[in-house]
Image (cartoon, helix red, strand yellow):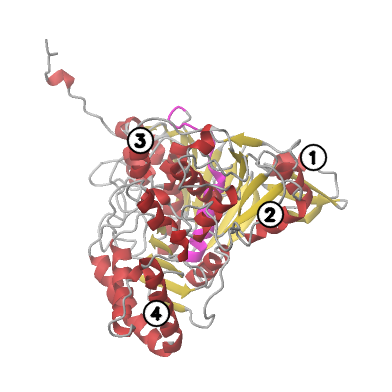
Amino acid sequence: MPKSYDASDIDVLQGLEPVRLKIGMYLGSADKRGRFHACKELLDNAGDEARASEGMKVYVNYDAKTDTLTVGDNGRGIPIETHKVTKKSTLETVFTTLHAGGKLKKGGSYGKGTSGTHGVGASATMAVSKYFQVWTYRSKRWYTQEYAKGKVLSSVKESKTPTTPWGQDCGTVVSVQLDETIFDNDHIPEKEILEWMDLQAYLHPGMELYFYRNGTRMDKFYQPKGVQMLLSRMIKRAEAEPLAKEALFAYSDGEVDVALQWSTYTREDIKSYVCGSHTGDGGTHEKGFDRALEKILEDFAPRGAEVVLKDFTAGMHAVLNVNIEAPAFTGQTKDKLATKEAYELVKDRVYDALRKWAKANKKHLDDVITRAIEFHKASTRASENRALIALGKTTRGGRSQLPDKLNEVPGISADKRELYLLEGDSAAGTVGQTRDSKSQEALPLRGKILNVWKVKGKDDASKAESLEESEEIVNIIRSIGLDLASKDPLSKLRTKKIVLMMDPDPDGAHIESLVVGALQYLAPQLFEKGYVWRLDAQALFKVQAGGKYYWDATIEALLKRVPKGYDKATLGRIKGWGEAPLPMVREMAMDPKRRSLARIEPSVGKDLDRFMALVGDDPVLRREVLGIRELE
């Protein structure tokens, strides 16, 4: 018999209750991403206010002992007067009412370039707080109010100057401890906050961002040349060289900031932002950018040439930041821009500027288009790689064709050979000096490899279509010795221990997930046999003392081990294996007795293929499906 259904079954959530009960709608998730998003709402507000007031300073302090984040700006402060709608202090209204803020409509006090759009962010963060306090400087006085878990703890009252490392009488200061009963993991994501600050300095030239840890200043982020410097960093990280250093395209008018350059890289590398927030899923601004590039290709490509946009943008690095008033996104996490006007805005301005640039750099553009035409030809014909997709097959007189970059160890059995898959040539340099040349091979990978789960179907033809264009995938398969044409792809293995050794950062985690995803797609038997491992190393800081290197996962732990009189100039974060001290690489990565490896377990379930096809484009979901975590 069906259950009764009446008015008593209808729940009405009041105030900020919806945020605590449905956190995914407001902050994306209850895991590390959601915790960072809660912090980012406060960071974005500080950045918006710093720009609006032309003060251009943002301060952040992380107290690791209490897991408290404090964010400040040198802006105008939040009004405290009674709001005419809520009949409460405006300060209280801002932090306790969904859809209350100064950025909801065009023509407001912020103008263009704010990341806030819904009037939700600050109040959502307060809703998921264990403790939350705000100070605002108005009429030459400080005022404060305290909150917790979506509730008001005190009235707005005059206050002493808040205790902050920067000690400044202006702007707003917000301090938060997140509620551990809401979130899955247990600390403020310091690394992601630093990355946000670093990025904002590039996207907003002239802005100064200061990071303090336990009250001690650790970093200052300042990039007066903006997106051009971010573009240079992207090219460097791809381990590529510009095709023509002088042929850098850059355009900025306050609403559209863009820089692009072609390099020896062979994939598209575009990062888009709206008012400083990364739009990982693109949106109308990216579509406008693509259309501008298409029009340039149509204008300057030889008549009748067979070439499409993806060939033209192969090897193109680009940064696009759009600063528009009241941007509309598809969700609170702001991953995709939905503002229709952004399409025409970006298309027209980028196209006009690119035409002028193209005429001044005609020879370079002709070379890029010629290369694009060759890329198109290579992608539409049965190239040499297609004949080798049954990899493990042989060529040239029956001899196996191993990658040139592979540090090969000949003459030993698969049981004794270890294959390290590395991120970049710089890591290959350190591993080359520390590996056991009698048993350990190393293959450096260049950038993010092909996501094979984007390919529909799993038949040999589909594999061939995707793999023939990917040198990195081909190199991996050859180095392992997979025979995809055989019923048993492991029948000709060269190694039975594959070690993934990626850098301890988000890019490294992304590359690792792509490699695991590719192996799971091509030969899941590797995981079933227990042949795939990852380096489980968490040393992120190093210092030198008395001619000897020391390293550990945190600065606090590191300094406890280091003798007095250490060289302060050598104290710093290890950004990648390529810059790690050789003794550290030898101990943590190469020495079988001291290294820490974690076996990657097989992904099982009859619906794995269907599920992976659905999440193949989402790096975060992909890492969750494959059981990969980012190194802290």
Kindly identify which residue carries mark 4: 369
Q: Residues within 10 Å of mark 3 (few under 14, many from 20)?
A: some
* Residue 161 visible within the image: no
Closer-to-camera residue (423/274)? 423
Q: As drawn, is 508 to the left or to the right of 366?
A: right
Kindly identify the residue that appears in the image at 35 percent across and 81 percent down.
353
Q: Which amino acid type is shown beneath numbered disc 3?
A: Ile
Magenta segment? 181-203
Q: Which amino acid type is shown beneath numbered disc 2?
A: Glu
Kindly identify which residue carries mark 3: 23
- For the residues labelled 2 and 4, the Cα–Cα distance comes to 37 Å
Q: Quadrant of residue 418?
A: top right
Q: Residues within 10 Å of mark 2 (few under 14, many from 20)?
A: some
> Mark 1 or mark 2: which is in front?
2
Q: Which amino acid type is shown beneath numbered disc 1?
A: Arg
Q: x and y percent of residue 354 in the render?
A: 36, 81
Answer with mark 2 or mark 3, whichever residue precedes in sequence: 3
Image quadrant occupied by the C terminus = top right
With respect to residue 612, does 54 lie above or below?
A: below
Closer-to-camera residue (572/576)? 576
- For the residues labelled 1 and 3, the Cα–Cα distance comes to 41 Å
Q: x and y percent of residue 233 in the render?
A: 55, 66
> Mark 4 or mark 3: which is in front?
4
Kindly identify the residue that appears in the image at 52 percent across and 83 percent down.
246
With respect to residue 534, does 351 lie above or below?
A: below
Kindly identify the residue that appears in the image at 47 percent across and 31 percent down.
184
Q: Which amino acid type is shown beneath numbered disc 4?
A: Ile
Secondary structure beneath dot 2 equals loop
- For the residues labelled 1 and 2, the Cα–Cα distance comes to 38 Å
